[in-house]
Amino acid sequence: MKYLITFFISICCLIGCAQKKQPLHGETEFQRELNAEYKDASTSPLKDSDRKHFVGLEFFKFDSTYIVTSKFERFPDEEPFEMKTSTERRPIYVKYGEVSFELKGKLFKLNIYQNKGLIESEGYEDYLFLPFSDETNGLESYGGGRYIDARFPEGDTMIIDFNKAYNPYCAYNDKYSCPIVPRENYLKTRIEAGVKAFGKH
């Protein structure tokens, strides 16, 4: 009888643990990896109170329309400048080039940047930074705009996947210092792809 009671308690504990440990949401590998990163205390920008109940960010539905092949133009003679951030910090960036692309029948152009300090870090030697704002900001998406990570292109084209657009850490926690999207990188259209605003669902 004692063994039966122990077995029953063990089963109840297992069921209880399974109910508490909910799987992280994510329609794509990018979404699942981002959710895993945000759930992990060692890598998450979330406040502890938010992370405790975190099961996943909210994303626009994946849409292949927002994967575009852009024309890349290198600007090798640009002068480094101090990029404004949400704090007094002023990291040094340089305009690395421009990407121009067609989206839903309209032509757009964005500046793409290189962080002069970050290139000293291993694994970031070829890293490029593509911040942008659009007409979903302050509505479905974060008001301060979003970012896309990129790498040096091999030729004169670059694939831009807006489904991989993510929020600055400042969208989750005001302890961070985040680059402000330059005015030149405003897209006069709705980019219904990538991460949505946090805490609105």
Image: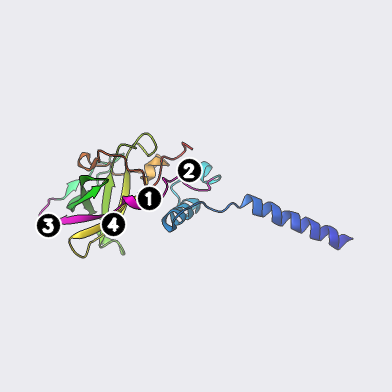
Mark with earlier residue (3, 1): 1
| Disc 2: which residue | 47
The Cα atoms of the two marked residues, 3 and 1, are separated by 33 Å
| Disc 3: which residue | 76
The residue carrying pointer 4 sits among few (fewer than 14), some (14 to 19) or many (20 or more) residues within 10 Å by Cα, namely: some
The Cα atoms of the two marked residues, 2 and 4, are separated by 27 Å
The Cα atoms of the two marked residues, 4 and 1, are separated by 19 Å
Labels 4, 1: front one: 1
The residue carrying pointer 1 sits among few (fewer than 14), some (14 to 19) or many (20 or more) residues within 10 Å by Cα, namely: few
Reply yes or no: does residue 55 show up in magenta: yes
- Residue type at mark 1: give it: Asp
Mark with earlier residue (4, 1): 1
Q: Which residues are magenta?
A: 54-79
- Residue type at mark 4: give it: Ala
Rendered image: mark on residue 63: 1
Labels 1, 2: front one: 1
Labels 2, 4: front one: 4
- Side of 176 where 4 appears, left or right: right
Do the numbered discs 1 and 2 sit on residues whose CB atoms are within 8 Å?
Answer: no
Do the numbered discs 3 and 4 sit on residues whose CB atoms are within 8 Å?
Answer: no
Residue 15 is drawn in which quadrant?
A: bottom right
Determine the secondary structure under disc 2: loop
- Side of 9 where 160 appears, left or right: left
Measuring 45% from the left and 57% from the top, which residue is drawn there?
A: 33
Estimate the x, y position of residue 145 in percent, counting from the top left. Answer: 32, 41
| Disc 4: which residue | 150
Labels 3, 2: front one: 3
Estimate the x, y position of residue 51 in percent, counting from the top left. Answer: 51, 46
Do the numbered discs 3 and 1 sit on residues whose CB atoms are within 8 Å?
Answer: no
Reply yes or no: does residue 159 show up in magenta: no
